Image (cartoon, rainbow, N blue to C red):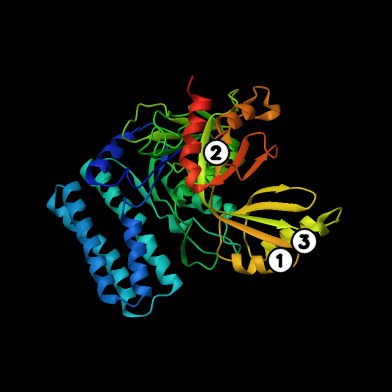
């Protein structure tokens, strides 16, 4: 069994869906195909929810109608038989009617999640209809809401997913192809929920783990994970192999091709993940596995929206338990720390969520002087850095000799050097690192 996930751009039009249908056609191999919403759909649904929260029912209704017309057009292009197209449009309209029903009363959080779930339900409905009714091929549409569920802590319930996926697949032992939705799931209470933005990658990994897949494939519009940000740096290239740890670091620190959580279930079950390009299906892409290569630094990624906090206190000197007390402040406000450096009298750390920053700062000022630097970016250098026999750190710091550096975190992981710079210096830093590390 393989699991193949296709992102929004991969199924973003009738033509793209036709191309995906050919990519997944392998009659002798069992596959579960996980589809995202068509590109632009989730943004449109988010906007509909925002308008309803704002009480602008007329604008929300107009947005629903515009999205409905877009799907009518795609259905007409994708399904040439008028009878098949008419039937599909009727099914699509039932979905849009469910959204319209939510315009008649103030929108609740549950209602918003129902709206956001429609994108994947619409894309799989159209794709399955095309694959079976136009191409005449056999495929089973698996409702993800039947087996994808969160637990009481709002984390994926792996045991439930494994059990109920097996139950859902059991009646189709002779079938080789299954199509399901990414992103959407149910809460522990049975309400429609989701795995947050980018969650289709996570869905694919969770499903792959539950099905004991031999491989998980993530198909996007990029040829694998690149060694630097191609939007900023010219001449980047795809990395052919990464370890799970390296991929997780890059995903967390800004590599947009991969959702940060998506590697975890695959890693736990030892399932390789392959990143492939729908537009260039013959390209080798990037293979993520337990194997770590010899390259000292393979890739660089950057994460914006970082806030740096410095706490300076003479009470730190030889103070047993000081760091624990400090961290408990962030725990109380459910705010994660990305980087940390310490000295005898000061602690510097970074957060990427400033929602509760005022409350955090109020408590931290009890310890001493607090300084805050906003508009920071973390640049993450990833590779095989254990013992750094190649002098990679020296090369990186030499490349950044003209860039003001706010913090450095090195040694906590054998796969990562993290460097904090002002966001205004991020582009210059990425270009300098590219020239110093990857251009020979």
**Whole-number angstrom distance, CA of label 1 to CA of label 3:** 13 Å
The label shown at residue 325 is: 3
- Element on which disc 3 rests: helix
**Where 325 sits versus 268, above or below?**
below
Q: Residues within 10 Å of mark 2 (few under 14, many from 20)?
A: some
Mark 1 lies on residue: 365
Mark 1 and mark 3 lie on one chain; the one further toward the N terminus is 3
> In 3D space, how far apart are the residues under numbered discs 2 and 3 (Cα atoms)?
34 Å
The residue lying at 75 percent from left, 63 percent from top is 368
Task: Evaluate if marks 1 and 3 touch, with contact meaning CB atoms under 8 Å apart.
Answer: no
Place of residue 209 in the rendered image (x, y in percent of width and height, measured from the top left): 54, 43
Mark 2 vs mark 3, foreground winner is: 2
Image position of 411 (left or right of 14)? right
Mark 3, Cα crowd under 10 Å, few <14 / some 14-19 / many 20+, is few
Q: Between marks 1 and 2, how big is the CA–CA gap?
A: 30 Å
Q: Secondary structure at mark 2?
A: loop
Q: Can the viewer see residue 286 in this picture?
A: yes
Q: Position of residue 317 (x, y in %)?
A: 84, 54
Q: Residues within 10 Å of mark 1 (few under 14, many from 20)?
A: some
Q: Which residue is mark 2?
A: 403
Relative horizontal placement of residue 136, taking residue 347 as reference (left or right):
left
- Residue 42 or 207: which is nearer the viewer? 42
């Amino acid at each position: 069994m393989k699991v193949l996930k296709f992102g929004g751009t991969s199924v973003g039009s009738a033509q793209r869906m036709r191309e995906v249908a050919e990519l997944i056609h392998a009659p002798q191999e069992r596959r579960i195909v996980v589809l995202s919403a068509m590109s632009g759909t989730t943004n449109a649904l988010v906007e509909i929810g925002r308008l309803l929260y704002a009480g602008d029912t007329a604008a929300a209704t107009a947005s629903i109608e515009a999205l409905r017309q877009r799907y009518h057009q795609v259905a007409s292009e994708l399904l040439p038989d008028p009878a098949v197209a008419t039937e599909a449009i009727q099914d699509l309209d039932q979905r849009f009617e469910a959204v319209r029903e939510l315009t008649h009363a103030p929108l609740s959080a549950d209602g918003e999640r129902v709206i956001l779930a429609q994108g994947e339900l619409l894309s799989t409905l159209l794709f399955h209809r095309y694959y079976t009714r136009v191409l005449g091929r056999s495929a089973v549409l698996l409702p993800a809401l039947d087996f994808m569920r969160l637990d009481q802590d709002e984390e994926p319930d792996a045991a439930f997913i494994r059990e109920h996926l097996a139950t859902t697949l059991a009646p189709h032992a002779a079938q080789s192809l299954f199509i399901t939705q990414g992103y959407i799931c149910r809460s522990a209470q049975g309400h429609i929920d989701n795995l947050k933005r980018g969650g289709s990658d996570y869905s694919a990994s969770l499903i792959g783990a539950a099905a004991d897949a031999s491989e998980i494939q993530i198909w996007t519009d990029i040829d694998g994970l690149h060694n630097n940000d191609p939007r900023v740096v010219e001449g980047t290239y795809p990395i052919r192999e990464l370890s799970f740890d390296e991929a997780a670091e890059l995903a967390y620190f800004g590599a947009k091709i991969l959702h940060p959580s998506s590697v975890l279930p695959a890693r736990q079950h030892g399932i390789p993940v392959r990143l492939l390009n729908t537009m260039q299906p013959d390209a080798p892409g990037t293979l993520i596995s337990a194997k770590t290569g010899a390259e000292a630094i393979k890739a660089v990624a950057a994460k914006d929206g970082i806030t740096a906090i410095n706490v300076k206190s003479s009470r730190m000197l030889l103070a047993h338990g000081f760091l624990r007390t400090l961290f408990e402040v962030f725990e109380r406000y459910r705010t994660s720390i990305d980087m940390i450096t310490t000295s005898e009298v000061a602690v510097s750390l970074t957060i990427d969520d400033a929602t509760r920053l005022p409350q955090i700062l109020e408590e931290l000022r009890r310890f001493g002087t607090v300084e805050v630097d906003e508009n920071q970016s973390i640049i993450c250098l990833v590779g095989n850095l254990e013992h750094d026999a190649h002098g990679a750190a020296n090369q990186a710091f030499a490349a950044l000799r003209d860039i003001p550096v706010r913090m450095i975190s090195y040694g906590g992981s054998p796969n990562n050097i993290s460097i904090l710079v002002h966001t205004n210096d991020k582009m210059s830093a990425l270009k300098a690192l590219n020239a110093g590390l990857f251009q020979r």
